[in-house]
């Protein structure tokens, strides 16, 4: 098991462009989470999948953001018409089915986005 | 709305000292509380997880305590080393049936001086 992986690790784009990030969770983990972390802040929850179903979306996830997990395995996070305020680290995490109260979420290395 | 606060925001101590990082949360209805470590530009590594029914957890030189009724947790690091330099994040998992999100504090940036 190689852990949660994210691709790309770094992305530089110009304002107005669209970007897409990918997250591959730990195999057998059916729960997948996206968080966003800006400089000097803790990660903030964006959205959560159980299998292919998107069960919760934060108000931080504007209409320009869309996340998918079509086959219940990997997930993509797309940002359309990027803005400079979108510059952040985008973190993905996964957890196993029916996590008990003692179960952690396992985080990937993150994708750092810089919008020029 | 659950809020997590960490004090101090930054801390520098000489190598070898024992230190305490503080975390407070506003709603005591939590499943668990976790302490994470984050190195610059990297993802998060879980250090300790305390279930709501527990009072403390220990791993090596780290000890985390939880006082759920007062909404407080501390992370104690013994005999600090330069390799401990990182940002330490406190996070709680709220007590809701389908809400699995973790709510994080802003972190404490720790620098151990050699």
Image: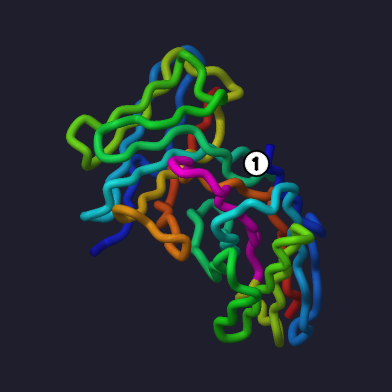
Q: Which of the image's four quarters has the N terminus of chain B?
A: top right
Where on the picture, by quarter, is residue B35?
Answer: bottom right
Residue drawn at x 56%, y 23% is A59
Pointer 1: residues within 10 angstroms few (<14), some, or many (20+)? few
- Residue A99, relative to residue A75: is it above or below? below
Q: Which residues are magenta?
A: B85-99
**Residue B45, how many percent across, how many down?**
49, 63
Would residue B53 be found to the left or right of residue A109 on screen? right
Q: Chain of mark 1?
A: A
Q: Secondary structure at mark 1?
A: loop
Would residue B90 be found to the left or right of residue A110 on screen? right
- Residue A68, relative to residue A83: is it above or below? below
Residue drawn at x 36%, y 53% is A95
Residue drawn at x 56%, y 25% is A60
Would residue A112 be found to the left or right of residue B112 on screen? left
Residue drawn at x 46%, y 28% is A57
Magenta part, dominant SS: strand
Instruction: Let me know if residue A22 is in the magenta part.
Output: no
- Residue B9, relative to residue A73: is it above or below? below
Task: Please give the count of numbered marks on the rendered protein.
Answer: 1
**Residue A46, how many percent across, how many down?**
49, 33
Q: Which of the image's four quarters has the C terminus of chain B?
A: bottom right
User: Circle 1 sits on which residue?
Assistant: A39
Where on the picture, by quarter, is residue A88?
Answer: top right
Instruction: Let me know if residue B97 is in the magenta part.
Output: yes
């Amino acid at each position: 098991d190689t852990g949660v992986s994210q691709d790309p690790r770094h992305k530089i784009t110009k304002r107005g462009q669209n970007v897409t990030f990918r997250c591959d969770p730990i195999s057998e983990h059916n729960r997948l989470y996206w968080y966003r972390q800006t400089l000097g802040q803790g990660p903030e929850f964006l959205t959560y999948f159980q299998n292919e179903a998107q069960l919760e979306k934060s108000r931080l996830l504007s209409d320009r953001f869309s996340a998918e997990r079509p086959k219940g395995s990997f997930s993509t996070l797309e940002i359309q018409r990027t803005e400079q305020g979108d510059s952040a680290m985008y973190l993905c995490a996964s957890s196993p089915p029916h996590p008990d109260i003692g179960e952690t979420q396992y985080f990937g290395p993150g994708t750092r986005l810089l919008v020029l | 709305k659950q809020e997590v606060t960490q004090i101090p925001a930054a801390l520098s101590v000489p190598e070898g000292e024992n230190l305490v990082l503080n975390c407070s949360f506003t709603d005591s209805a939590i499943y668990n509380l976790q302490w994470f470590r984050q190195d610059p530009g990297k993802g998060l590594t879980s250090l300790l997880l305390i279930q709501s029914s527990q009072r403390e957890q220990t791993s090596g030189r780290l000890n985390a305590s939880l006082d759920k009724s007062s909404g407080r947790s501390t992370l104690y690091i013994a005999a600090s080393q330069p390799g401990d330099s990182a940002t330490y994040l406190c996070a709680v998992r709220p007590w809701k049936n389908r809400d699995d999100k973790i709510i994080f504090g802003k972190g404490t940036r720790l620098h151990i001086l050699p």
